[in-house]
Image (spheres, grey):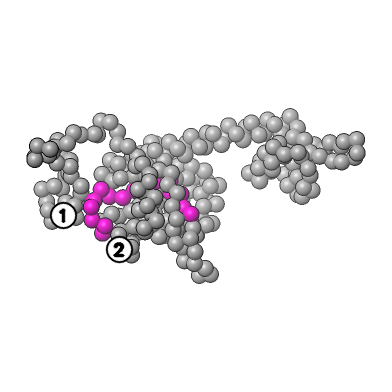
Amino acid sequence: MTAPRLTSLHRRRLREVWRSAGWPAQDIVEAELLAMGLLERQHDAAGRCTLRVTDAGIQTLAESAALNRAVRSDHEALVEQVAQAQLREGRIAWRGLSLRAKVVTQEDEGWQMAMPDVFSVRHTSVAAYLQPVVHEIKVRRADLLADLRRPAKRAAYLDMAGALYYVLAEGIGRVEDVPPECGVMEMRAGVLQTLRPAPVRALAHEAGLPFAVWMALARATPVPRPESEQRRLGEAGLSENAENPDSPDSHEIVERPDTDGG
C-alpha cells in the first residue's frame, strides 16, 4: 500500500485540528492524517471521540511554519527588487495595494478584489502616458500554477493596467506556462531578465485609470526612492527629456526652484 503524500490540504487540516476542540470530520483527509500518524483518536468517559495532533504532527506543523516564513521572505525580497527596478526606470511604484476592478467573463460581470504585488505608473501629468503595469511575483511553482487557474484575477489586473507581468523565481516555471496576454520575467543569478515582453495596450478610461484605482492610490504611500537617488529642488538632471518638449516624456513632472521669492 502506497503511503499518502502530505499536501497543503493535509497541513491546513492539521492546523485546524490544533486550534480546535478536535471534533472529527470523518473524511478522507482525516483518514490519511491518521494513517500517517500525525493525528490520533482519543475517547472520553462518555465514549465521545476527538482528535489530537501527535508529536509527529506538531513537528510537521513547525516545519511547515518555517517553510512558510522562508517562502514569504523570498517573496518579499523579490517584490522589493521588482519595485526598485521600477523606480530606477523613473516610475512610481506601490506595494500591497488592495484594488477593486470590474471583470467581465463569458458567464458574468462583476467586481473583483485584486492585490497586485507591484503596481506602477510612469511619472507623468498626462493620463494617456501613464502606462500602468502590474507585476505579479511567484517564488513557488505550486503558487504559480494555482494563480494561472484564476482567469478572473488576470482580468482584474488587465482592467487596471496596460500590461501584466509574471515575475518568477528561477526554475519554477516556463514561458509557455503563462498565458500570452501576460509578459514573463525571471530572476536569474540576482538579475531580472525579461523572457517575454508583455503586450501593451491603452486603457479605455478617460482619466488613464479607473476611478477606484485613483482613490486607492491617493490613500496609499508609494515605494520610497533610495536616499542616494534623492535630489534637492533645482538640481540638474531631474528629467532626462526636459530639453525635448515634443517627447511624451517631456510631460514628466519636473520640480523647479521658486523664482518669486516665496
Residue lying at the far right of the rendered structure? 46
Residue situated in front as seen by the camera: 37 or 158: 158
Measured as percent of width and height from the top left, residue 210 is found at 36, 59
Range shown magenta: 113-128
Measured as percent of width and height from the top left, residue 243 is found at 10, 48
Would you say 8 lies left or right of 46 here? left
Q: Nearer the viewer, mark 1 or mark 2?
A: 2
Q: Earlier in the sequence, mark 1 or mark 2?
A: 2
The answer to whether one can see residue 202 in this image is: no
Residue under label 2, please give it.
Answer: 206
Residue lying at the far left of the rendered structure? 260
Q: Residue at x 57, y 34 (%)?
A: 67
Residue 127 lies in the magenta stretch? yes
Residue lying at the far bottom of the rendered structure? 106
* For residue 130, above or below residue 82: below
Residue lying at the far front of the rendered structure? 262
Q: Secondary structure at mark 2?
A: loop
* For residue 161, above or below residue 97: below
* For residue 226, above or below residue 89: above
Residue 42 lies in the magenta stretch? no
Would you say 181 lies left or right of 126 here? right
The answer to whether one can see residue 19 in this image is: yes
Q: Name the disc covering residue 136, or none.
A: none
Quadrant showing the N terminus: top right
